[in-house]
Amino acid sequence: MKSTLLKVDDISKTFGATMAVNHVSFELEEGRLLGLIGPNGSGKTTLVNLLTGFVKPDSGKVFFRGKNIDGKAPYKIANLGIARSFQMVKPFYELPAFKNVVVALRSPRVMKNVRGGKYGERDDVAIDLLEEVGFERDSFVPYRLASALPHGYLKRMELARCMALRPELYIFDELFSGMSMSEVAATLPLIERLKEEGKTIIMIEHRLRELLRIADSVIVLNFGSKIAEMMPAEILESEAVKKAYLGSETEME
Amino acid sequence: MKSRKNYRKERLDRGIKARSDSIYVLTSYREMLYMVAPRFVPVLLLLSLPLILKLSGQIYWLKVLIITCQVALLALSWDYLASVGLVSLGQAFFFGVGGYFSGALNHYLGWSPILAIPAATLCGAIICTIVLSPVVRLKGIYFAMITLVLPMVVTRVIEATKIFGGTEGLSGLTPLPNIWSASYLIIAIVLICLFGLRRLIDTDYGLVLSGIKENDRAIMASGTNVYRSKMEALFVTAIAGSFAGAFMAHYYRFVGMPAFALDISVLPVASAILGGVGTFVGAIIGSFILAPLSEILRAMGPLRTALYSLIMVACIVVLPEGIFHYIQRKYHQFERWVPFKGEKR
């Protein structure tokens, strides 16, 4: 019996008159991969922001390993072991790629637990991580300024930055958007490996084919409400999902 | 240069750059000189300047040098705070607090400058950091506005409550032993700050600081407490500012409301921008241009400010990137002629 890693209890957030997230609850067991889908503007990113402390919830609670984390500062949540990637990559453009990863290696969480306390060692660890996400090690690529790298590399650099924290829960906000087919194909095994290592993952994704292949369960959001939680195989057959994405039949006529 | 047969042009730094712009491989005496000379020569020049001025009897210019160093110190600390994304328009606040603290210790308690200056540097910095702690959460123009107004508020408070001598200020403070040792003290502090801050910003700690400027959300997501980092940067800035204030209080033997004056805030900012933001050396270069320039123009009378502003506008139009960035770029673009190897033409 696996233990519950994350428990979201009736969480809500309004922006003005919009109910961005409307009384959403779910539980996530350790080592599972949860997909989060829904049409644009359905509150997926807001939900991630609520979980990671970037937005404070109006009501509801979030428990990580039984500990209440809602309303905590983002850096505290990151140090507890929740790493997130951003949908819009905003790297440190003026820094070389590997230095972008070093920033995460300097967090209290990593400095306490992982080798690389000294200046030079952290650079090596960062380049190892970049190699894992597919940066060519013995080329100039890890040393290039982030501003000189293509978008797909920046997305994978974001993944390396998350991995640098050695978190227990990864939250990927549209990691695959903007990646080429071959980059996605190269990144998928890496995510499967993280899962095999026992990490828990939440993925927001529009690329359903890839997501449904690796997800254990999927939550569908629409207008801020959770409309379904089901197995990946059921998603494409579900009437509720079709309705959310394509509108109901009466509307279509 | 005329083109030469069987030779090609090569950049001087071609052979020593490895992988990125910041990693060098030095294998010969000349290559080392290429890297070390631009650092070494200005430092030697700066250290010999008081000696030259003293021997040639230019005491007036020695005084100008000390004022220049004060501006340089404030400009350096401004640049450090700007590297975290906090643009301060109130360097005079740090300067004034340090000055008044040291002045009060000397005037009321009779502490000698040797004790009063370090005490004022540390305590002044702590006071400044505590006062500004709620403001640090603000960004961009809002932080600039508050820091701009703060010294003015303090001036009015001193004027109204008549504390620390009111509008008269505190005069007759114990002077520094002599102008000679004073000039070397402040030059040493400027150099320590320059190389110390450059070293600090190059470490991983400094990396996180410069990351905050570019994207603080990613820094938060990476587990760093942004607020605390900003406070630490503010404290370092306040130390340099308070030292400058405490030093100048004993140098002038007076501290008063002019310590919070607007030009004490503005001149360092102008220097740092003129010299090139984010380099620290730029802040020094800028202040060694602007501070003496403002002294030279003193002879012009009322036209001084107009001419001064005109020169500054001209500099910024011609070199918007800052003087130091320009010099650095040109220095690395030096070329030499090398013979073709292998196939002959």
Image (cartoon, coloured by chain):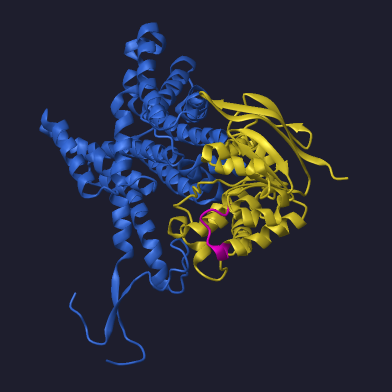
- Which range of residues does the magenta coloring cover? A175-183
**Among all residues in the image, which is located at the extreme top?**
B161
* Front residue of B308 and A147: A147
Does residue A115 appear in this view? no
Image point 36% across, 7% down: which residue? B160
Image point 28% across, 28% down: which residue? B263
Q: Position of residue B111 (x, y in %)?
A: 49, 22
**Among all residues in the image, which is located at the extreme right?**
A1
* Front residue of A215 and B110: A215
Left or right placement of residue B265 versus residue B212 in this view: left
Q: Quadrant of residue A209?
A: bottom right
Q: Is residue A96 above or below residue A17?
A: below
Q: How many marks?
A: 0
Q: Is residue B203 above or below residue B190?
A: below
Is residue A96 inside the magenta stretch? no
Shown in yellow, the chain is A
Q: Position of residue B95 (x, y in %)?
A: 39, 28
Image point 41% across, 13% down: which residue? B164
Left or right placement of residue A116 versus residue B298 in this view: right
* Front residue of A10 and A162: A10
Left or right placement of residue B121 versus residue A108 in this view: left
Left or right placement of residue A97 versus residue B224 in this view: left
Q: Position of residue B178 (x, y in %)?
A: 35, 34
Does residue A105 appear in this view? yes
Q: Position of residue A166 (x, y in %)?
A: 69, 50
Q: What colour do you see for chain B? A: blue
Q: Is residue B257 above or below residue A88?
A: above
Judged by its main secondary structure, the magenta piece is loop
Is residue A178 inside the magenta stretch? yes
